[in-house]
Image (cartoon, rainbow, N blue to C red):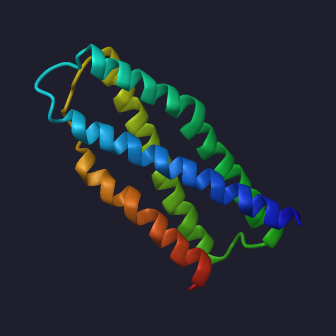
Amino acid sequence: MLYLTLKTFHIFFVLLWIAGLLMQAFILLVSRTLPGPPMPEERSTLRLLIKWNRFITTPAMVFALSSGVGIGTIAGWFGNGWLSAKIAIVMLLAGIHGVQAGKLRRMLTVGNTHTGFDPRVLLPVILGAPLVIVFLVILKPF
């Protein structure tokens, strides 16, 4: 019963986390079209997104990671190749979350700084990584 409960919470928190990542990526992508620093309406949208990130997306990531560790421990999957691949992809997504969250905070405080960051590169990764993870978890190919 504990396994199924953890699995249920894990799936729920992963959905929240990925939704937050996609929202961040979309806002960052749209912000590239802005000609200058964010206007007051855009700044209020950024503030709301940063609050969402702080109170929903980041805790969802933490709970998804911790419930995933619990599931892996209960099932005895640590050491399996497919789980190692999944963990690597999850760490990539966690890194993307940090990069995007930092970029959003800088946009609010400094303004639009497009140098060295292209959200168009990260969006396919955010969309494709969960698909690969689902493939690994269901098929356990190695």
- Between 106 and 3, the one nearer to me in the picture: 3
Residue 10: percent from the left, percent from the top? 68, 57
Residue at the image point whose x is 42% and y is 21% from the top: 47
Residue at x 69% of width, y 73% of height: 79
Residue 83 to residue 27: above or below:
below
Residue at the image position 52 percent from the left and 69 percent from the top:
133
Give me the residue at 57% from left, 62% from top. Answer: 87
Compared with residue 72, is residue 116 higher up or lower down, i.e. above or below? above
Which residue of the protein is positioned furthest toward the right in this rendering?
1
What quarter of the picture does the N terminus occupy? Answer: bottom right
Q: Position of residue 62 (x, y in %)?
A: 64, 43
List the single residue furthest toward the left: 35
Q: Quadrant of residue 27?
A: top left
Answer with left or right where residue 42 lies relative to residue 36: right
- Indicate the position of residue 115 as horizontal and vertical percent values: 18, 33
> Where 133 sits versus 32, above or below?
below
Quadrant assignment for the C terminus: bottom right
In the rendered structure, the answer to whether residue 2 lies left or right of residue 98 reads right
Kindly indicate the quadrant of the structure image that contains residue 78. Answer: bottom right
